[in-house]
Image (cartoon, helix red, strand yellow):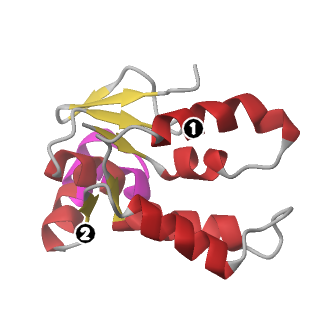
């Protein structure tokens, strides 16, 4: 079961012509039934997709509808264990805290792959392989 980072969700709703290929790929990925997310990913999606200075932001209602739909997937909640694991990953690998929390959430759900374009493709962190699905 792959874990999806926020950028996959954001590309799926992008209206930027320069991101059309990534949008198509993200939509195809989200049609899978075996993915996982976290509360953090859903929160980041909402904030980025609805921000006022974004060209063509989503409405609150549209963003909420999408988030509700994505909760059909396993969603890792933020808790003390995730925080502690994220801090340990940060100390060992020096990613940003937020990226470490994503890795910790993926690991907590038993995901072997993390789909993202924000980290080093092919790198393995604590049993989680970083995969850039847009390569």
- What element does badge 1 sit on? helix
Instruction: Estimate the x, y position of residue 96 in percent, counting from the top left.
Output: 43, 52
* Quadrant occupied by the C terminus: top right
Residue at (19%, 53%) from the top-left corner?
88
Q: 103 or 97, which is in the foreground? A: 103
User: In this rendering, would 133 be left or right of 33?
Assistant: right
User: Magenta-highlighted stretch: main secondary structure?
Assistant: helix
The residue labelled by disc 1 is: 26
Residue bounds of the magenta highlight: 86-100
Instruction: Estimate the x, y position of residue 99 in percent, counting from the top left.
Output: 41, 51
Instruction: Estimate the x, y position of residue 36 in percent, counting from the top left.
Output: 30, 49
- What element does badge 2 sit on? loop
Residue at (68%, 52%) from the top-left corner?
13
Instruction: Estimate the x, y position of residue 131 in percent, counting from the top left.
Output: 41, 27
User: In this rendering, would 104 be left or right of 13?
Assistant: left
Q: 120 or 116, which is in the foreground? A: 116
Is residue 96 shown above or below 27? below
What is the spatial separation of the Cα atoms under label 1 and label 2, in whole angstroms?
A: 23 Å
Q: 25 or 115, which is in the foreground? A: 25
Judged by depth in the image, the label closer to the viewer, 1 or 2, is 1
Residue at (24%, 37%) from the top-left corner?
1
The residue labelled by disc 2 is: 77
């Amino acid at each position: 079961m792959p874990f999806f980072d926020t950028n996959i969700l954001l590309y799926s709703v992008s209206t930027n012509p320069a991101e059309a290929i990534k949008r198509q790929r993200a939509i195809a990925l989200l049609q899978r039934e075996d993915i996982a997310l976290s509360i953090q990913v859903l929160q980041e999606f909402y904030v980025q997709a609805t921000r006022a200075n974004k060209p063509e932001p989503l409405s609150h209602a549209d963003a909420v509808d999408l988030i509700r739909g994505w909760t059909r997937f396993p969603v890792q909640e933020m808790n003390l264990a995730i925080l502690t694991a994220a801090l340990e990953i940060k100390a060992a690998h020096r990613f940003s805290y937020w990226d470490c929390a994503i890795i910790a959430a993926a690991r907590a759900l038993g995901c072997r792959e993390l789909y993202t374009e924000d980290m080093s493709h092919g790198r393995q962190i604590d049993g989680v392989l970083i995969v850039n699905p847009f390569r």
